[in-house]
Amino acid sequence: MTRAFVFPGLTTRVVFGHGTLAQVPDEVARLGHGRALVLATPQQADQAAQMAGALGTRAAGVFAEAAMHTPVDVTERAVAAFRDASADCLVSLGGGSTTGLGKAIATRTGADQVVIPTTYAGSEMTDILGETAEGEKVTRRDPSIRPEVVVYDVDLTLGLPVGLTMTSALNAIAHAMEGLYAPDRNPVTEALSRDALSAFAAALPVLRDDPTNRAARAQALYAAWGCSTALGYVSMALHHKLAHVLGGSFGLPHAETHAILLPHTTAYNEVAVADLLAPIRDTFGANSAGAGLWQFAKDIGAPMTLAELGVSEADLDRAADLAVKNPYDNPREITRAGIRQLLQDAWDGRKPA
């Protein structure tokens, strides 16, 4: 029997393909704007400058100071730059750090956003913003955070390093994983999650060995869109709580943290909702979803332990304390002992039973 559900509808316009970067000026014009501030990290400042050049008179300038975990002090400087430039919209070019900065400016100013993802991190289709201040990451949701347009250009991912390819893809897979058991899931987000999992499972082993394979790059970027869209319309649970705690409070790299936690958070909740996580088990060909993701991550060369990221074993107690403080809703009860064991398994890199 089909269960009752609510589907609010997709609101973000998506432009997907090869060479779609050239359409960004038209998308800015379509939104009715004439002064776009281009955002990037310092590492992608040259690309941002090229984007500003392509925008021509529609460019209000470049702000290339986006940083991991969206520090509030960086956002404050960016908002000042936005206002000083008399900008009326944002063009965010890059991965999750740049997308996060654009969202933070948009929710403070009401500016429209055109986002151009260059990794598979998958935050561009969501109304979620995580910001860091004084060593703590706080996450919130609001309609003003969701971008108006996302332009996916497969060509921008052809040079993505293999390591970042794999970790940002596992980051996206975490979105699909939580989408499968979210209490507010619906048939659309479930279908997107299943389809995205299959696409990543096919594309990532190819990209491990042939990073410039255009068909596999397109398949992976399509999968990232599906994962991001699914998370954009459902609630987050344990996995994202732990990733935000470790990232915001310990300064860990975002994609790598997601990648390492994913098999263990999946296994933790699989105890309660094995039926809902069956698509992961089936996609990755294992006896359990957690074990399947662990083996897949290992096979594609992803980092496997929190110790690799510089987390000390002594840090795990504090991380567990933070994780059970104001916990997200979750299909399995969150206990301090259970989370502490999960973190130990992720620190050791132990394969989920």
Image: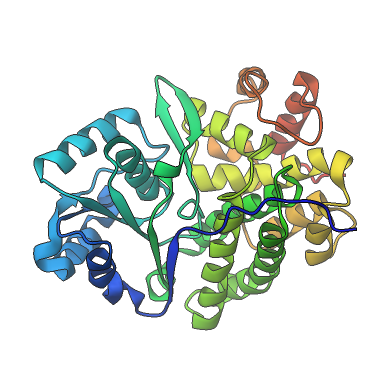
Locate the C terminus by quadrant: top right
Number of numbered labels in the structure image: 0
User: How does the figure colour the protein chain or chains?
Assistant: rainbow
* Image spot of residue 118 (x, y percent): 40, 62
Task: Examine the rendered structure and indicate whether residue 125 appears above or below residue 325.
Answer: below
* Image spot of residue 251 (x, y percent): 46, 31
The residue at 36%/56% (across/down) is 94
Locate the N terminus by quadrant: bottom right
The residue at 78%/64% (across/down) is 284
From where the camera sits, is residue 265 visible? yes
Q: Out of 39 and 111, give the one closest to the viewer.
A: 111
Q: Along the horizontal axis of the image, is 99 left or right of 168?
A: left
The residue at 54%/82% (across/down) is 215
Task: Examine the rendered structure and indicate whether residue 214 appears above or below residue 127.
Answer: below
Task: Examine the rendered structure and indicate whether residue 233 appears above or below residue 325.
Answer: below
Q: Please tell me in which quadrant of the rendered image residue 114 appears.
A: bottom left
Q: Out of 99 and 89, give the one closest to the viewer.
A: 89
Q: Out of 224 and 258, give the one closest to the viewer.
A: 224
From where the camera sits, is residue 117 visible? no
Q: Along the horizontal axis of the image, is 349 left or right of 15?
A: right
* Image spot of residue 191 (x, y percent): 71, 64
Q: Along the horizontal axis of the image, is 88 left or right of 254?
A: left
The residue at 78%/58% (across/down) is 280
* Image spot of residue 146 (x, y percent): 43, 49
